[in-house]
Amino acid sequence: MRISTLNVERAGINSILDQQSKLSYTQQQVSSGKRIVTPSDDPADATRVLDLKKTQARTEQYQDNITLAENRLSREDATLTGITDALQRIRELAIQGLNDTQGSTNRVSIASEIRSRLDELLGLANSQDGNGEYLFAGYQTGTKPFNGDPFLATGATFTYVGDEGQRQSQISATRQLATNDPGSDVFMGVPDDTGAASDIFTLIYDFSVNMEANNPNATVLNHIDSALDNVTTTQAKVGSRLNVIDSQKSINEDHILTTKAAISDLEDLDYAEAVSRMNLQLTGLQAAQQAYSKVQGLSLFNYL
C-alpha cells in the first residue's frame, strides 16, 4: 500500500494539532483551578455544580435577610427598653403626684416632667431603624405612626396612622420571621376609666392635665401597668425572634460550608495529576514536532 508524502505530512500535522489541543485544555484547567472548564467537559457534574451554586446563592441571600432582620429587631429591642424606662419614670412621678401630701404647686411641677417624659415616650414610639423606616408603623414604614403634642395646655389628641401589619423576612427555604411589631400592639388597647380601649399617650396626657388642676386620678397607675405589660410582652417576642435568628444563622452557615465542599469535590482540579499530565502532553507535542520534522526529510524528491 502506497502512502503519499502529502498523507504523511497531514498525519504529522494532525498529530501536532491534537497534542496542542490537549495541552491547551490542560493549561486552561491549571490556570483556572477547575476540572470542568466548560459544561461539555462533564455535563452531569456541570449540572450538579450549577444547582449547588444556586442553592449556595439562595442561602447567602437568607443570611443577608437575617442580618437585616437582626438589625431591625435589635433596634426595636433597645427602643422597647427605652420605652419601659420612660413608663417606669412616669409611674414614679404619678405616685409622687398622687400622694396626699403634695400641694398644687408641686403637682404642677411634677406634671411638667410628666409632659416631658410623655414627649420622650412619643419620640420613642416614632423611632426609625438604620434605613429610616419607622419601627412601629406596621407596613406603613415611611409614615410617622404617632401624632400629638404633649405640651398643649388642654385638648391634645394622639392618633395612630400606621396599620397592624408585620413585615416578614425569609430566613430559610421554609421559615419566615416577623421583623417588626405594630404600634397598635405596643401603645394602643390600654383600657381607660370606662373600660374602652385607648392609647397610653392620651391617658398619660389627661393625667398630667388633671394633675395641673390639682385633681389627679389614681387609675392612671393601672393604665401605665397595662402599657408596661404590652411592652414586656412585645419585648419577649422580640427576644424570642432574636434567638431564632441566632439558631438559623448557624444552620445556614453550616449549609453554605457543606455546599461549598460539595462544589469543590465536583469541580476543583487535582493539581498534581494535572501538572503531571501537562508535562506528558508537552513531551508528546515535542515528540510529534520532531517526528514531523524528520518525516519531511524522507521525500524522494530531496534526492533528485
Image (cartoon, grey):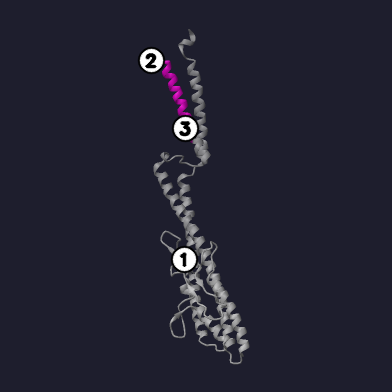
Give percent across and percent down for residue 264. Answer: 48, 47
Circle 1/circle 2 CB separation < 8 Å: no
Circle 1/circle 3 CB separation < 8 Å: no
Between 179 and 156, the one nearer to me in the picture: 156
Residue range highlighted in magenta: 1-25
Give percent across and percent down for residue 146. Answer: 50, 72
Q: Residue at x 52, y 26 (%)?
A: 286
Circle 2/circle 3 CB separation < 8 Å: no
Q: CA distance from mark 1 to mark 2?
A: 89 Å
Give percent across and percent down for residue 47. Answer: 40, 45
Could you say which quadrant of the image residue 36 lies in?
top left
Is 8 drawn above or below residue 240 in the view shown? above
Give percent across and percent down for residue 40. Answer: 41, 39
Dominant SS of magenta comes to helix
Report if residue 17 lies within the magenta region. yes
**Residue assigned mark 2:** 2
On residue 140, the disc is: 1
Label 2's element? loop
Task: Name the residue at the left extreme.
Answer: 1
- Closer to the chain start, of discs 1 and 3, is 3
Q: CA distance from mark 1 to mark 3?
A: 62 Å
**Residue assigned mark 3:** 22
**Three-letter code, disc 3:** Lys
**Three-letter code, disc 2:** Arg
**Three-letter code, disc 1:** Gln
Is 144 drawn above or below residue 203 in the view shown? above
